[in-house]
Image: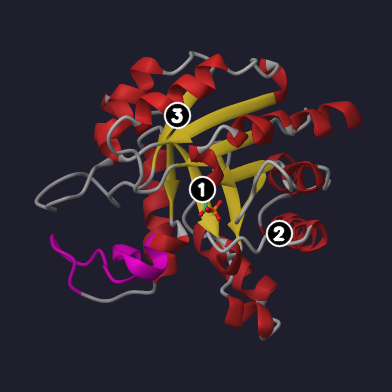
Amino acid sequence: MAPRKFFVGGNWKCNGAGDDVKKIVTVLNDAEAPRAPSVKVVVSPPFVFLQQVKGLLRPDFAVAAQNCWVRKGDAFTGEISAEMLVNLQVPWVILGHSERRALLSDQMISLSGKFPRKIVHNLTFVADKVAYALSQGLKVIACIGETLEQREAGTTMEVVAAQTKAIAEKVSDWTNVMLAYESVWAIGTGKVASPAQAEEVHDGLRKWLNTNVTPAVAESIRIIYGGSVNGANCKELAAQPDLDGFLVGGASLKPEFVDIVKSATVKSSSA
Ligand code: 13P
């Protein structure tokens, strides 16, 4: 089986006002190009900048949306549908980010009837989003991860397995799915998971997929890590055998994102 291609995603979250978009893209465009066969780079600006970033960005980098609606567009004010992203030729979408799971609508809407009526578990809602986005031809970065309380209670694997199981129940073809393991306690806190902590979860996820999906999916799926990744800690994390890249928040707005992209060379040199 072909080695898993390293992936570095930059999740800009709700940032990019003023001149920021141009500044960030200029840094990326001027950066010494990482060797295309060894790393895939995708940046995810807010919806309103997708078109602009796509137009300005070097052709070897791609864009992702940060969310999309769970099914075909209709009377859902403020939402963006998967079809719209496809129309704009946006190839990727991040779904189920913990900030959406915890703070925004990804935990409280169900699909019953034309309008959401019933509160359902957020796992189902995110899994439905993943399945719908895939059905429209998008590539999905599906986020999973435990809170600090869950980690301290020793339930990390149970939590991420349940999140992955919800997706597995809705998805049969995993070709266009990537898992982003983002330990919630590490997001935006400066407290990065240690390489051993990250590897333990990534390895556990692969074992879960091996048993519950197929050995081929377990082997081929990319599992990327997110949570306070920066230019200083990325190489050690990248060296972990089951870690296939990063989803970067704060550091994706800074020039050090280029260093994170270059950490892919840790993999190619060990291959
Ligand atoms: P930080 O890198 O800012 O911790 O954010 C991680 C994240 O949420 C990426 O999706």
Judged left or right of residue 73, residue 28 is right
Residue 61 visible within the image? no
Amino acid, disc 2: Leu
Mark found first going from the N terminus, 2 or 1: 2
Q: Magenta includes 241?
A: no
Helix, strand or loop status at disc 2: helix
Question: Distance from label 3 to label 1 (Cα)?
Answer: 12 Å
| Label 1 near ligand 1 (CB < 8 Å) | yes
- Magenta region: 100-117
Q: Determine which residue is flagged by label 3.
A: 24
Residue 67, above or below 98:
above
Residue 175, above or below 265:
below
Which label sits on residue 23? none
Specify the farthest residue to the bottom: 153
Q: Determine which residue is flagged by label 1.
A: 250
Q: Residue at x 9, y 51 (%)?
A: 75
Q: Residue at x 73, y 56 (%)?
A: 202
Judged left or right of residue 69, residue 258 is right
